[in-house]
Each structure stands twice: as structure tokens, then as C-alpha cells.
Image (spheres, rainbow, N blue to C red):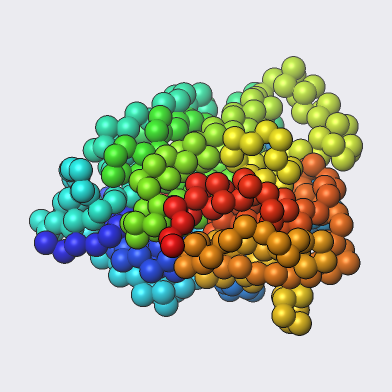
Amino acid sequence: MDEHEVVIAGGGPTGMMLAAELALAGVDAVIVERRLDQSVDGSRAGGLHSRTMEVLDQRGVVERFTSAGQTYPAVGWAQMTLPMDDVPSRHNCVLGLWQSAFEPILADWVAELGVPTVRGVEVVGLTQDDDGGDVTLSDGSTLRGRYLVGCDGGRSLVRKAAGIDFVGLDPSTSWMIAEVEMAGEPELGIRYDDRGMHALGRRLPDEPVRVVLTEPTPDRTTEPTIDELRAALISVYGSDFGLVSAGWISWFTDAVRQAATYRSGRVLVAGDAAHVHPPQGGQGLNVGVQDAVNLGWKLAQVVKGTAPDSLLDTYHDERHPVGARVLHNTMAQVAIATPGARHQALRDSLPSLMVFDGPRLEIVGMISGLDVRYDLGADDAHPVVGRRMPDLDLVVDGRITRVYELLHQARPVLLSFGATGSAAGPDVGPWADRVVLVSGESTAAGATEWELPVIGPVDAPAAVLIRPDGHVAWAGELTDPALPDALTRWFGPPRR
Ligand SMILES: Cc1cc2nc3c(=O)[nH]c(=O)nc-3n(C[C@H](O)[C@H](O)[C@H](O)COP(=O)(O)OP(=O)(O)OC[C@H]3O[C@@H](n4cnc5c(N)ncnc54)[C@H](O)[C@@H]3O)c2cc1C
């Protein structure tokens, strides 16, 4: 039997990002992927939000993605366009990059990192014991892993086999989605009628037209045909606009479901395997990638034995509320789009609120993922604790750098600011095998104040302990007696 430290079921965005994180941490992981190659049916997810670009920047690979897409200085929410060029992030935009283009770029990086992918087979069963689990594959072979992670999408076999409930709401609405060639030139844009919202759009002139049509009932169970699409176009628009062909036809609903727990013993779930929701706001792929970045370093430390197994419970504690909030905001967006005069009045009213910075920045922070704050249990802590570390410009040993460059190796960083930090601190030597110690100077912009998304300026702390996922575990003076506790909590006990 082939044995690995971690077996990942599913090589979509989440599984590949997790594999990359584990590889950077030196963990022996394998991906099992049923697709023979990385091609995706249809274009699916439309792009990357700010926090996803930031986590890719933390690993030094973001340019591979940004150079392949187009940036837009606004997020879409409830059919509104909310500008975000004043948001404090180097990536204060949406990157338009179809999932069909995103996945091959990610796959190339994962291959460079040396992660093996077993392709063309499915995970068909799993069992777990106290030391790990066995994964049965469709070719009859078995893989053993010390931990198993289900990144196998919304219908996750891993989640079901582990007995994890998928709790939520059944669909109330179904939408047909297609990418089509049309002889005619339809007017692009959104339209509402008694049935709901319909849209025709295209990003670039040479792309197929993307069609989204609300269906009469939410009861669909099979893939739509081109004849059904043609009939639906005619019933909504009175024309099929000379429909020639459809490269992709599918459907989605507003069903929302979330795994009751993201962990069951040696089995974890991430991405769509842990949460499904409608695509409004374009968040699914992004949340999955960010789940992977939260889980990867924790799983690596547990596998390597530097941190206790209980560290993995913080993956559920931190990411389940984030997933729940995404389900919630997509439900709100579906509700706002409900047909009828009363909901039209709501739609007419909302834009007048969004001209104010407060509500606009609140929504932008949520959809972009920049406002995520993990509850690390320290209410009186510095406001940056639990949030993502801003990507400050720094001078380290006379060299100009920035914070995210310090995170390229996915290792924790204890960063003290020479200008304000205290030289006298606790002995962090017992963690030096795991934590990178950096003394830097902030450039003028970040020396006294940091600008955080949504909450605005905060006093710059003297030092920060940054987790490999870029979230701040502790902030304060190096003499703070809470620092050794934070080091132990997140990176394991001291080694003398
Ligand atoms: C029509 C549509 C539009 C969308 N629009 C957006 C958007 O605008 N923005 C956004 O962020 N998201 C969007 N999404 C959601 C996005 O596509 C998903 O959230 C994202 O793909 C989740 O990634 P994942 O890796 O968790 O799961 P998946 O992409 O589903 O990947 C799971 C992988 O596991 C493999 N697999 C499944 N079962 C097994 C098995 N038993 N054995 C082996 N391999 C298995 C699959 O082949 C697949 O490669 C959209 C989705 C759809 C369908």
C-alpha cells in the first residue's frame, strides 16, 4: 500500500492550494484527482478577490495569475458595483481570471513543488483509525495517509464517508448558465421580470456570451440541453439571438449548505466540500483557497510533531464562521434579487446607501475577504491580532523588502520594528527552529500607524508574530509575557 503523510481527495483550487502549502512545509502529500488533466467544464468562477491575491503574493506567485487576467477596481454585490480603489491592500481590485485559466497556473506551481497527483481515478471509500486512514480508489488500489483531506467538491465523498452532516437550505431558485455563440448581438446587461433576474454578458469582445437565466422552478435535476436553453432565451427575451452553439451549459441553485464540522478525527474537509452556496459575489473559489491556507501550516506542524493534534481544531473554529458568513451574504444577495415590486423598491434604495464609505467599505471588506478576523480569544489585544497582516514596506539589514516577501516560505515570522521595538525581550531561541526572527524598519508610511481594511488606522505595534497564513497571532512589545504563550499555542512547546 502506498503511504503518505497527507492524502488530498480532489485537485481543484482548494486541493491544489493545500498541496502547495504542505509541500512548502516539507510534508509528503499526494492528490487524488478524477480528471485526467486540469481542464475545467466552462469557465466557472470568474476571478480572484483581494485576499486570495494577497495569499498568493505571500507565496511569491501572484504575478503568474495577475499577468494572465484583467483587474477591475470594484467588487460586485447584489448587482451593484462597489469601488474599492481606496481599500488598503496592494491588490485592491478584483482579478478577472476564469477558473479554467486559474487552475492550470496553480497546477504548474504545485507540480514545480513536487507534489504527485494520481489522475484519472476516484476516491470511492475511506476508513480511519487512531493513526490515520485508508483511501480506496476506483482502480482497486488503496492509499494510506496519516491525515485525509476532502477537497472533493460539493458532493464530497470524503465528507459523506466521514459521517459529517451537510446542513442548510434546499434551493428556492434555479438558474441556467451557458457560454454561447450567437449570430445576433443581444443587448448585454441584467434584466428583471416576474421570474427573476436574467443576465447576458461578456468580458472581452472575442469571448462567448455568458447567459444566466432564472428558471421557472427550482426542481431541475439534470443538465440543461441546448433546446431548453433556446426555449428559455425566447421565453425571457423573445429571441434566441441566433443561438449557434453552446460550449457549456449547466445550472446552479441558491441551495446553501455547510459541513457541521470541518474535522472528524483524522479527516478534514475544505472548500466546496465544506460549504456550498450560490455564486453571487464570486466567493466560492476564494474561500476554498483561503481554507487551504489556514489549514496547510497547521496540518504540517501536526504531521511533523512540532504542534499537538488539537491545533487542527482551530481550523474549524476559524474557518467555519467565515464559511457561514459567506452563506449568509449570498442568501442576502439572492433575497435582494427576488422578483416583484417590493423587492424592486429594495433594489432601488440600496445604491443610495452605498454612496457612503461606511456601508460600501463594510461590504467590500467582506466580499474581498480582507476583513476576516479570527477570534483568537484575546479581547484586549491589539486590533491587528487575528486579522491579516498588512503588506508594509520594510528595510531589513539595509535591504528594501516588504512583509509578504518574508512569508514566501510559509514559515511563521516574529517581526520587530527597530524604530519602535524593544531590544530586550524574552528568549525566543527555543522556537528558532520554527519561527523566523526578523528585525526591520518600517518606512515612514507604516512607522506609527497602520491602515487596516474596514476598521481604518491603528497604532503600529512594536512587534508582531505572523502566522504562515499571514494572520497576526500576537502584537505588542517583545517584553510582553504573553509572547511565549502565543509562540507555544501556535507553534508548539519550546525546544531547549
Ligand atoms: C456555474 C458556477 C459559477 C461559479 N462562479 C464562481 C465565481 O464567480 N467565483 C467563485 O469564487 N466561485 C464560483 N464558483 C464556485 C467555484 O467554482 C467553486 O467554489 C470552486 O471550484 C471550489 O473549489 P474546490 O477545489 O473546493 O472544489 P471543486 O472545484 O469542485 O474541485 C473538486 C475536485 O475534486 C475532484 N473530485 C471530486 N470527487 C472526487 C473523488 N471522489 N475522487 C477524486 N477526485 C474527485 C473534482 O474532479 C474536482 O477537480 C462557481 C461555480 C459554478 C458551478
| Res 342 visible | yes
Q: Nearer the viewer, residue 19 or 490?
A: 490
Residue at image coords 83%, 26%? 349
At 29% from the left and 51% from the top, the residue drawn is: 147
Residue 466: image location, x then y, percent: 61, 57
Is residue 12 at least partly visible in the picture?
no
Across and down, in percent, residue 345 comes to 79, 22
Answer above or below: position of 20 versus 51.
below
Query: In the drawing, does residue 401 fall left or right of residue 120?
Result: right
Q: Is residue 32 left or right of residue 365?
A: left
Q: Residue at x 22, y 49 (%)?
A: 132
Number of on-image labels: 0
Q: Is residue 221 left or right of residue 284?
A: left
Taking 85 as reference, is 279 above or below it? Answer: above
Q: Residue at x 71, y 35 (%)?
A: 380
Up the image or down, 305 lies above or below 130; here it is below
Q: Position of residue 244 (x, y in %)?
A: 51, 57
Residue sitting at the far bottom: 398
Quarter of image, res 496:
bottom left
Q: Position of residue 474 (x, y in %)?
A: 64, 49
Q: Is residue 190 left or right of residue 457?
A: left
Q: Quadrant of the N terminus?
A: bottom left
Out of 243 and 431, give the one closest to the viewer: 431
Q: Residue furthest top?
A: 342
